[in-house]
Image: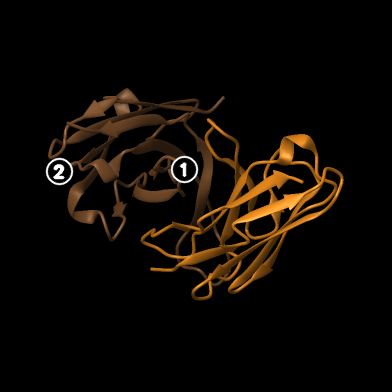
Amino acid sequence: EIVMTQSPATLSVSPGERATLSCRASQSVSSNLAWYQQKPGQAPRLLIYGASTRATGIPARFSGSGSGTEFTLTISSLQSEDFAVYYCQQYNNWPPSYTFGQGTKLEIK
Amino acid sequence: QVTLKESGPVLVKPTETLTLTCTVSGFSLSNARMGVSWIRQPPGKALEWLAHIFSNDEKSYSTSLKSRLTISKDTSKSQVVLTMTNMDPVDTATYYCARMYYYDSSGYSYPLAYFQHWGQGTLVTVSS
């Protein structure tokens, strides 16, 4: 099983600043990685797929990068609605065996 | 508009079997390259993928839970059903169903897929 490790567990950032979240895979997943945002009491929402492609309706301040085993989600100029938990997820295998990271909580500084 | 809605018991007893239903709308389960997964999330914890069913009825399961899970679909009812046997308090979680989006990528002989649309989730508590 591919293990996904996110860091840091909690990130404190002030509104208007940049946030950088990391995700590492235990083996290469190429660019087959997605990022999700989850707010309290809500289902996750797809942000990024293919490591760097924004999903429909996702603001341009969200960007993803990386390939292989190292990935980054960057949120430029944080807005109040961006404070949430973010998960990375790999989808490199068939038959499917999807795995998520443990999440990074982005909180207001 | 794509929607998914989970339904099932709020409370189950240890050792019982859980049956959850995901009712979808806005798309057909009989379409080619259509699939649905189940994912769960214990309170305050991370997401965990459980099972996936593809349009050709191919099924996949989490390695750690495979012996306890069964996924099936009823295309005529637009429903995907997940059963989990021998429930334990550690299985207390919010259970989500999600529609997959598949795409092709060079170098891969199989489709790649991520969770495009999610249901609202249903909280299941396991307690005697």
Does the CB distance between marks 1 and 2 fall below 8 Å? no
Q: Count residues near mark 1 (Cα–Cα under 10 Å), then give few for <14, some for 14-19, many for 20+.
A: few
> Who is closer to the viewer here, A68 or B75?
A68
Do marks 1 and 2 share a subunit?
Answer: yes
- Image quarter where the N terminus of chain B lies is top right
> Who is closer to the viewer here, B114 or B89?
B89
Residue B34 visible to an observer of this rendering: yes
What x and y, as percent, mark residue B99?
47, 39
What x and y, as percent, mark residue B47?
45, 48
Location of residue A13 with respect to B8 vertically, above or below: below
As drawn, the label of residue B44 is 1
**Left or right of B5: which side holds A101?**
right
Chain letter of mark 2 equals B
Location of residue B47 with respect to A69 vertically, above or below: above
Q: Residue at x 29, y 54 (%)?
A: B61
What x and y, as percent, mark residue A22?
65, 63
Dividing the picture into quadrants, the one containing residue A71 is bottom right
Disc 1 is placed on an element classified as loop
Of callouts 1 and 2, which one flags the residue occurring earlier in the amino acid sequence? 1
**Left or right of A93: which side holds B8?**
left
Residue B74 visible to an observer of this rendering: no
As drawn, the label of residue B86 is 2
Q: Residue at x 43, y 43 (%)?
A: B32
Instruction: Give me the chain that's brown.
Output: B
Q: State the CA–CA distance, disc 1 to disc 2.
A: 23 Å
According to the rendering, which colour does chain A have?
Answer: orange
